[in-house]
Image: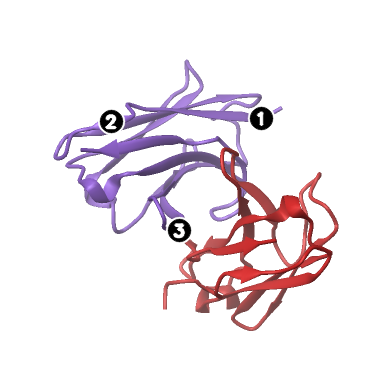
Amino acid sequence: SSELTQGPDVSVALGQTVTITCQGDSITDYYANWFQLQPGQAPKLLIYGRNNRPSGVPERFTGSTTGRTSSLTITGVLAEDEGDYFCGGRDSGGDVVLFGGGTTLTV
Amino acid sequence: QVQLQESGPGLVKSSETMSLTCSVSGISVTSGGYYWGWVRRPPGKGLEWIGSFYYGKNSYQSPALKSRLNMSVDTSRNQFSVSLTSVTAADTAMYYCARGVNMGRFDYWGRGTLVSVS
């Protein structure tokens, strides 16, 4: 199917570890990317490829992929991590971009 | 430093055409190696890809919006634009422009511009 499905909204305490998931058939062809959206700010690329962080993204953000599931893990959550997280990437045909429905993280 | 900034009408009447422009600094939209695209987020909903292009090569559009969509580039101003015809309330959203290293890996984004359809 040409869609990405994200897990439910999550609520965690400061310092805990949280994992957000994204499922879709296209993930078996192309890695998903992970984005953070916070009010009033430009969306931010957090993870791309297998598990790569752009310059400036803290090491507490990591990614992994198993089969048709991509996961974003935040280890040692900070208050500043509160926001919406989206997975996104190419569909299997390569000429359409898909986004997951988003997961809201509350700290 | 790469920066993108969206500009738009703010308010559009239903059935009319909305046009948005993305002004780019720090890099030319004609430089190779990058895609340029649009993404929107309706209130309370998720991200929706609108379309992307690779200058001088291919243009890609959301199948859901393709029939109402037009994308263009103004190289003299280092801007790219999108227009959407026959808008409805469903087109009310925050609209973002972004640079992509590939079709899905958007590494630089603008802060967005809100468009409301009345």
Residue B91 point in image, percent of width and height: 29, 46
Count of labels shown? 3
Which residue is drawn at the image coordinates 84% and 65% (left, top)?
A15
Q: Secondary structure at mark 2?
A: strand
Distance from Cα at disc 1 to Cα at disc 2: 28 Å
Placement of A9 over or under B76, stated as above or below = below
Which of the pair B24/B88 is nearer the observer?
B88
Element under disc 3: loop
Q: Is disc 1 surrounded by few (<14), some (14 to 19) or many (20+) residues within 10 Å?
A: few
Mark 1, mark 2: which one is toward the viewer? 2
Q: Position of residue B67 (x, y in %)?
A: 22, 50
Residue B46 tag number: 3
Q: Is residue B66 left or right of residue B16?
A: right
For label 1, the residue is B2
The residue pinned by badge 2 equals B11
Tag 1, which chain?
Answer: B
In the image, is B55 to the left or to the right of B102? left
Residue kind at label 2, given as amino acid type? Leu
Chain A palette colour = red
In the rendered picture, chain B carries what hue? purple
Q: Chain of mark 3?
A: B
Would you say residue B38 is visible in this rendering?
yes
